[in-house]
Structures are given as C-alpha cells and as structure tokens.
Image: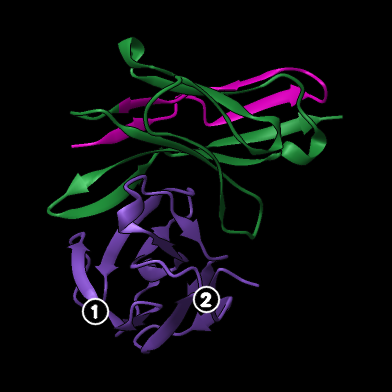
Amino acid sequence: AQSVTQPDIHITVSEGASLELRCNYSYGATPYLFWYVQSPGQGLQLLLKYFSGDTLVQGIKGFEAEFKRSQSSFNLRKPSVHWSDAAEYFCAVGGFTGGGNKLTFGTGTQLKVEL
Amino acid sequence: DTAVSQTPKYLVTQMGNDKSIKCEQNLGHDTMYWYKQDSKKFLKIMFSYNNKELIINETVPNRFSPKSPDKAHLNLHINSLELGDSAVYFCASSSRQALILALHFGNGTRLTVT
C-alpha cells in the first residue's frame, strides 16, 4: 500500500530564510509525487509534481523539490521564504488501486513565517 | 473561471438530518473525487468516479452516497448525519489520460454537525 510520511508537524522560519520540508513515501513502483499547499479556508493548490526524468523539479512560487529514490524522499525547498508562504503543505504519492487512481496524502506540515 | 466549484461553502446542520454537497468542474476532466479532511487536517479519499462510474470506494459508511449525473458533476449525499461527519469535504478532478494524477481541488465545504 502506498503511504506518505511528513515527519514535521510544525515548522517556523524567519522571513528570508531558506526552507526544507521533508517527505518520505512508500510505494512499490516508480511513484508519482506531488506537493500541495493549502492556505486557510482554501482548497489545495498544486505546487509541483514529479513523474519521471530530472529528479529536481521546479514549481510555482519559487519552490523546488528533489526526488531521491535511494532515500524514498521528495523534500520541498525554497531558498528564501516570504511571509505569504505561511500555510499548510501536503506531500502526496499517486498510484493505482483496484483499477482506480488515487493520491495518498501525508499529514501535512504547517509552516509559520516570522517577520 | 472557477475550475472546480463546490456548494455550499459552509453547512451547519443537526444530527440525523440529510444533506447534499454539489461539485462541478469545467476542466474537461473525466475523473472526480471526494476527499474528507478531518480536524487534524488529514486528507483521505472517499470516492472516485471515472466517466460517471464508481471506481474507488474507500470503506465509507453507506450513509454517504455519491452521484455522478455526468462526468462534470459529482454530488455527495449524506443521510442521518452524525457528529463524526463534521469535517471539510473537498471535491477534486483529474484527467485519467494524463497519467500524472494531478488533482485540481475545489475550495471545500465545511460541514458542522451539532
């Protein structure tokens, strides 16, 4: 069964500092991996995705993530955080189950940005 | 141009009532989903429909009945509401042919059962 672990429930960084959010996945084949962001009262917005090819993927809002198969990780990074980045971040792995496709989400990491 | 829209945004009701949440997408996608987000922000898939056909049912109580009149709509009807049903329900859509499973989410319906 596919699963995702986000070990950090809360992270606080200062504005302008770098950010790394951790994500580890479990999946039997080559995974489809995603990062989503959820602002308060909003739905989830796709930041970036990995399917194949270059293991360093670029996303919106200056985010990037690196797929490391040996570590089963897909960590999200941003070199300089802005106050508007404060939100909940979800890592997800996609796969097929019973003939259907589904995304399995991690429990999320809440990012707070100190001014 | 809302891609995935759900109504209502907020729903407050009493235990035992029956309620529905509607979802529509204008992305031309062929697959739609319902996800439930609990108070700890954990997101769990409930149902998935592809071209009006149910393809995923994640052991959801049969008080929850999804209905897809066409591939652009997926509604969720809940009978005999319970306190534990309080959550945010998200509708989402994707293109099965895209093979990448990127989901587009609605803004959610916050259901509060009192």
User: In the figure, is residue B104 to the left or right of A86?
Assistant: left
The residue under label 2 is which amino acid type?
Gln
* Kind of element beneath mark 2: strand
Image position of A23 with respect to B80: above or below: above
User: In the figure, is residue A9 to the left or right of A32?
Assistant: right
Gap between marks 1 and 2, in whole Å? 20 Å
User: In the figure, is residue A50 to the left or right of A3?
Assistant: right
Q: Which mark is residue B11?
A: none
**Residue A2 magenta-drawn?**
yes
Using the image as rendered, state which of residue B93 and residue A21 is in the foreground.
B93
Q: Which chain is purple?
A: B
* Kind of element beneath mark 1: loop
Task: Identify the colour of chain A in the image.
Answer: green
Which numbered mark, 1 or 2, is in the foreground of this view? 2
Instruction: Tally the numbered discs.
Output: 2
User: In the figure, is residue B86 to the left or right of A15?
Assistant: left
Disc 2 marks which residue?
A: B6
Residue at (25% x, 52% y) in the render: A101
Residue at (36% x, 51% y) in the render: B98
**Residue B33 magenta-drawn?**
no
Mark 1 or mark 2, earlier in chain: 2
Q: From the top left corner, tell me how far across and down residue B57 is, in percent.
A: 20, 64
Residue at (44% x, 54% y) in the render: B103
Which residue is most to the right? A115
Residue at (20% x, 61% y) in the render: B56
The residue under label 1 is which amino acid type?
Arg
The magenta stretch is A1-25
Disc 1 marks which residue?
A: B63
Q: From the top left corner, tell me how far across and down residue A57 is, in percent.
A: 53, 26
